[in-house]
C-alpha cells in the first residue's frame, strides 16, 4: 500500500513530493525499455481496446487519451458492464495476448474472487500491467447523529444495540462489507440496510432514513461540503487528498480497517513481458503528467507511487487475500446468496 504519512494533510506539497519520487521510480521502471526486441518496438501496430466492466469508464479514458497521443494509435474504451465483470473479463482473457486488448480492473474482480463468484482466475488468465490510482471511501453519518468521531459513533452504537442502521449499495458490495467490518472490529450491532445502488444509499443517509454510509470520496465530499452528512473517517491506509481533514480508520483505532478502491490494467495471460513492460512504462509516463493526475483526482482517483508489473501482481494477490478475510468474517454463503 501507499505510505504518505502526514503529507496527506497537505495535498499540494504531497503532490509535488509524489512527482519527484515518482520520477525516480519511473526512471528505473523504464530502464529496461531502452533496447527491447524489434517486434516489441513495433507495438502497438493497430488500435488498442480497453474493456471496462462494472465501473465508470472515465478513468480508462483519461489514461487512454495519453496512450493514443503517445503512440499514434486509436485507443477504444469498450464498456461491458454485465454479469458483475464476467463479460469484460472473458472478453480480455480470450483475446490475443499481444497487448492490444486490456482489462480495466477494479476491486469488483478481486472481491468476486474472494466470494468465489468469479468465472476467471486473475492470476492464471491475466498479466498484471499497471495500477493507476486508489479510491478512498468515507464513513459519513446523518447530521442528527450525535457523533463527531469514530470513537463517539462506536460508543453510541454500543449504547443502542441494533438501534443504528448502515446503508449499502447492495449485499456483497464494498459498502456492505464496510458495515459488517465495523460491527466485527468495534464489537457493535449496526443493522445493514441494502439499497439498489450507491446513489440511493447516499440519499437514504442524506434523508436520515439510515444513520450512516461508507461511500466513495467524491460523492461523500459533495455531501459533506453541503452539510447534508458529516464525515468521520476514510478507509484508505493514508488520508485522502480529497478529504485531508478526515482521519483514517487506522488512525481512529482500527488498524485492520483498510478498504481502498483502486483501478488498474490487466492483459491476457502470456502477453510477452516486453510488451507488458512497455505498457507499464507508458502508463507510468501518463501518471507523471500533472494534468492527468488532476483529471484523475477530479473523478476520485488518487495516483499512488508507480508499480512495476511484478508489484501490480502482488498488489492484486494481496487484495484478494484481504477481501477473503473480510468475506469469511461476514460469512461467505450469506454474501454469495445476496450477490448472485
Image (tube, helix red, strand yellow):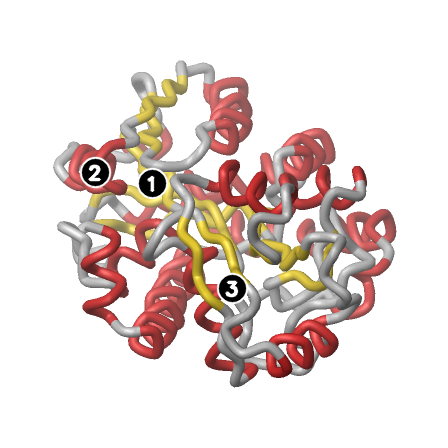
Measure the C-alpha gap from mark 3 to mark 1.
Answer: 31 Å
In the picture, measured across the screen, residue 120 lies left or right of residue 139, that is left
Q: Is residue 325 above or below residue 123?
A: below
Name the residue beneath numbered marker 2. 83
Position in image of residue 10 (x %, y %): 86, 56
Q: Earlier in the sequence, mark 2 or mark 1?
A: 2
Answer with mark 3 or mark 1, whichever residue precedes in sequence: 3
Which residue reaches farthest bottom? Answer: 187
* Badge 3: residue crowd in 10 Å (few <14, some 14–19, many ≥20): many
- Residue 152: horizontal and vertical position, in percent? 74, 76
- Disc 1 designates what residue? 275
Please say if 144 is above or below 183: above
Pointer 2 with pointer 3, Cβ within 8 A: no
- Residue occupied by mark 3: 259
Residue at coordinates 61% horizontally, 76% vertically from top-left?
157
Label 1: which secondary element:
helix
Query: Up-down: is 334 above or below 75?
Result: below
Q: Is residue 40 visible?
A: yes
Amino acid at each position: 500500500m501507499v505510505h504518505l504519512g502526514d503529507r496527506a494533510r497537505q495535498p499540494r506539497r504531497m503532490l509535488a513530493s509524489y512527482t519527484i519520487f515518482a520520477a525516480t521510480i519511473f526512471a528505473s521502471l523504464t530502464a529496461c525499455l531502452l533496447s527491447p526486441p524489434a517486434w516489441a518496438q513495433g507495438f502497438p501496430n493497430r488500435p488498442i481496446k480497453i474493456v471496462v466492466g462494472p465501473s465508470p469508464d472515465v478513468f480508462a479514458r483519461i489514461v487512454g487519451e495519453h496512450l493514443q497521443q503517445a503512440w499514434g494509435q486509436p485507443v477504444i474504451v469498450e464498456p461491458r458492464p454485465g454479469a458483475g465483470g464476467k463479460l469484460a473479463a472473458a472478453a480480455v482473457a480470450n483475446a490475443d495476448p499481444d497487448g492490444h486488448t486490456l482489462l480495466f480492473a477494479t476491486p469488483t474482480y478481486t472481491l468476486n474472487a474472494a466470494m468465489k463468484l468469479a468465472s476467471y482466475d486473475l492470476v492464471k488468465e491475466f498479466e498484471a500491467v499497471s495500477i493507476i490510482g486508489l479510491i478512498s471511501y468515507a464513513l459519513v453519518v446523518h447530521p442528527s447523529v450525535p457523533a463527531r468521531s469514530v470513537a463517539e459513533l462506536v460508543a453510541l452504537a454500543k449504547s443502542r444495540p441494533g438501534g443504528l442502521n448502515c446503508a449499502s449499495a447492495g449485499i456483497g458490495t464494498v459498502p456492505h462489507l464496510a458495515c459488517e467490518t465495523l460491527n466485527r472490529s468495534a464489537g457493535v450491532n449496526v443493522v445493514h440496510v441494502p439499497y439498489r445502488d450507491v446513489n440511493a444509499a447516499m440519499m437514504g443517509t442524506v434523508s436520515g432514513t439510515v444513520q450512516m454510509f461508507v461511500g466513495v470520496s467524491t460523492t461523500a465530499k459533495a455531501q459533506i461540503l453541503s452539510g447534508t452528512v458529516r464525515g468521520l473517517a476514510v478507509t484508505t491506509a493514508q488520508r485522502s487528498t480529497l478529504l485531508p481533514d478526515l482521519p483514517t480508520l487506522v488512525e481512529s483505532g482500527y488498524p485492520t480497517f483498510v478498504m481502498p478502491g483502486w483501478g488498474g490494467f490487466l492483459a491476457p495471460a502470456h502477453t510477452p513481458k516486453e510488451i507488458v513492460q512497455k505498457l507499464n512504462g507508458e502508463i507510468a509516463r501518463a501518471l507523471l503528467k500533472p494534468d492527468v493526475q488532476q483529471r484523475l483526482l477530479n473523478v476520485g482517483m488518487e495516483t499512488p507511487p508507480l508499480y512495476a508489473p511484478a508489484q501490480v501482481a502482488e498488489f492484486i494477490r494481496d487484495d484478494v487475500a484481504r477481501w477473503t478475510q473480510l468475506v469469511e468474517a461476514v460469512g461467505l454463503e450469506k454474501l454469495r446468496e445476496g450477490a448472485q
